[in-house]
Amino acid sequence: MGGGEIVSPGDYEVARHLGALIAKEGWILLNGGRASGIMEASARGVKENGGLTIGILPGTDPDWASEYIDIPILTGIGLARNYVNVLSSVVVVALPGRTGTISEIALALNIGKKVISLNFDLGPLFERYEENKQLIYAKQPEEVVDLIKKLLESNFNKEVGE
Amino acid sequence: MGGGEIVSPGDYEVARHLGALIAKEGWILLNGGRASGIMEASARGVKENGGLTIGILPGTDPDWASEYIDIPILTGIGLARNYVNVLSSVVVVALPGRTGTISEIALALNIGKKVISLNFDLGPLFERYEENKQLIYAKQPEEVVDLIKKLLESNFNKEVGE
Amino acid sequence: MGGGEIVSPGDYEVARHLGALIAKEGWILLNGGRASGIMEASARGVKENGGLTIGILPGTDPDWASEYIDIPILTGIGLARNYVNVLSSVVVVALPGRTGTISEIALALNIGKKVISLNFDLGPLFERYEENKQLIYAKQPEEVVDLIKKLLESNFNKEVGE
Amino acid sequence: MGGGEIVSPGDYEVARHLGALIAKEGWILLNGGRASGIMEASARGVKENGGLTIGILPGTDPDWASEYIDIPILTGIGLARNYVNVLSSVVVVALPGRTGTISEIALALNIGKKVISLNFDLGPLFERYEENKQLIYAKQPEEVVDLIKKLLESNFNKEVGE
């Protein structure tokens, strides 16, 4: 997860590198699917490394999908699709974003998903979830991958099945 | 808006008092509709003062609605209904809550709604919206009502039409 | 329920008359809310007789609501809102329409709602539901009102609570 | 598309055979994803022939997905997901079903999708769409594949992009 807004070149490259690592692990990337910002960067990193990408789009027009999305799911339900994004994910990784990303983090935590925040400081508002280890901070894409591996090994929730 | 979780007696009474003021203004209360926490308290305050309440419920079972809800809208779309809540509101008032409430605040700001936060400190994560006055803090229900009146008078957005 | 397409003057007047009867019974009309066709006609009939109307709109723009809708619920979830319409209704009344109306009839029957079809012949496709009396045909608005009264009296499902 | 209800062995084998043909063409199967009826049969046929299957599930529990679904999308929006199914499909193929299937056919026609009905007689209710060739009947899975090929070649709508 991460914003579709204008992103800094640094954040763009971090997202792209995370995508590359996800592809190398053989995991599937699912995100909001649009052709902008962190969404595009992470999907691009996956595709440049032979992985599979799914985009859960808010609208009804397939042209809104990034060129790096293999499978566009056109929901037509607007931002209500943020709920679909987090429900359909085994682990949610949050990159710097704005309100769209924050809504996804909040929904993910609400339904019991683990959230790994990569360089996105959520501040005191989410401290409760940091304390119970539902929300975990990471500083590097490699750290995110290690955390996901540990979560998958620990059979952390029954949703783990991909 | 506000959580369905266990709330402090103080927050409960503030929400109930806000409901009373809303009813006295002749405004309609729209919230998540469930029989718990801030949702129930605000609806109760409205009904005790002859107002009208609408509950946008996540599930398909009308028994989930609070007894203080006049018109239960059963969406059956789970937490995706949080998007419907904020879209259908002229002004969004946030009371202390957890991730459900935070997701609504984030979605409301995302779609350009004004959000009044009553005693719910959102911290640095939402500072940007505080600065541009899309997010406004209030300390008393009376202050919320005054803010809403000013917003309505200023014809602050085209959604104002109830 | 009924189409938003161009309707015959006859169907328009039948819908408007049904709205009038609904208002006189003190029932609430819930429909798709748009300013066209059967939706507008039924809401108009209700408002001309002092009743209350709720419109479950597909989009995010309140200007799409008919002027005869008291409470517009802006879902932003497109045609997925047809599911919300039937879930939130105690009894579903179908008037002549096209695919939007047919989808609502099918969804209503799917979730166990009673459907009264007023002059809308659904043909052999829905015969199964006619046989088990989940789908009932009527020829006059007055007949629809009588059928609804009988259903409400028989406490036909637990959703009856408005 | 097709029902999740108990199906005849004949319909089951037709759906499975259609799945096999879809896999051989290299197309992706998208359906409702549940472990029953036509949905399971078509996904099974695809997987037995090395294809890729996506299931758009109504609920939040991944255990509801058929074992033949590669990518379960958990929408959590109930039957509102029928809208997502048809929006995300390039061509909609309907097999014998009940109200769930009929709602999908109606929604697909409503949003302008081509619908191929394989041995599912929709009767006079949908005649209008048969006449304008938006709804096409087929009797064999091979015929469905030929029709889809012709539609894809004719660049029949801008959604064709898979």
Image (cartoon, coloured by chain):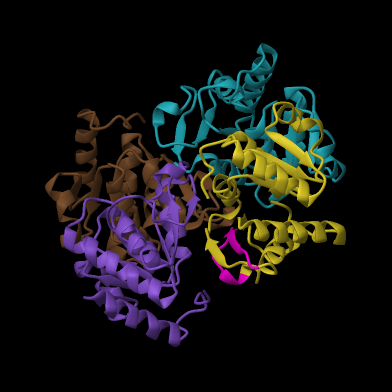
Chain colours: A brown, B purple, C yellow, D cyan
Q: Is residue A32 visible?
A: no
Q: Which one is in front, A154 or D111?
A: D111
Question: Looking at the rendering, in which quadrant would you find the N terminus of chain B?
Answer: bottom left
Q: How far from the left and from the top, in percent, is residue A40?
A: 42, 55
Q: At 74% from the left edge and 63% from the top edge, which residue is drawn?
A: C41
Quarter occupied by residue A161 = top left
How far across and how far down the image is residue B105, in percent? 33, 64
Q: Horizontal and vertical percent for residue A128? A: 15, 52
Q: Is residue B39 visible?
A: yes
Q: Quadrant of residue C25?
A: bottom right
Q: Does A40 sit above or below residue A98?
A: above
Which of these two is toward me, B106 or C159? C159
Please identify the residue farthest to the top as the structure is shown: D9
Question: Left or right: B36 with respect to A150?
Answer: right
- Left of D14 or right of it: where is B40? left
Residue lying at the far front of the rendered structure? C153
Instruction: Look at 71% across and 48% down and name the residue there.
Output: C145
Above or below for C27 versus B63: below
Residue occupying the point 65% across, 72% down: C67
Residues in magenta, as a range:
C50-63
Q: Is residue B49 left or right of residue D110?
A: left
> Is residue C96 magenta-colored?
no
Q: Residue at x 67, y 29 (%)?
A: D98
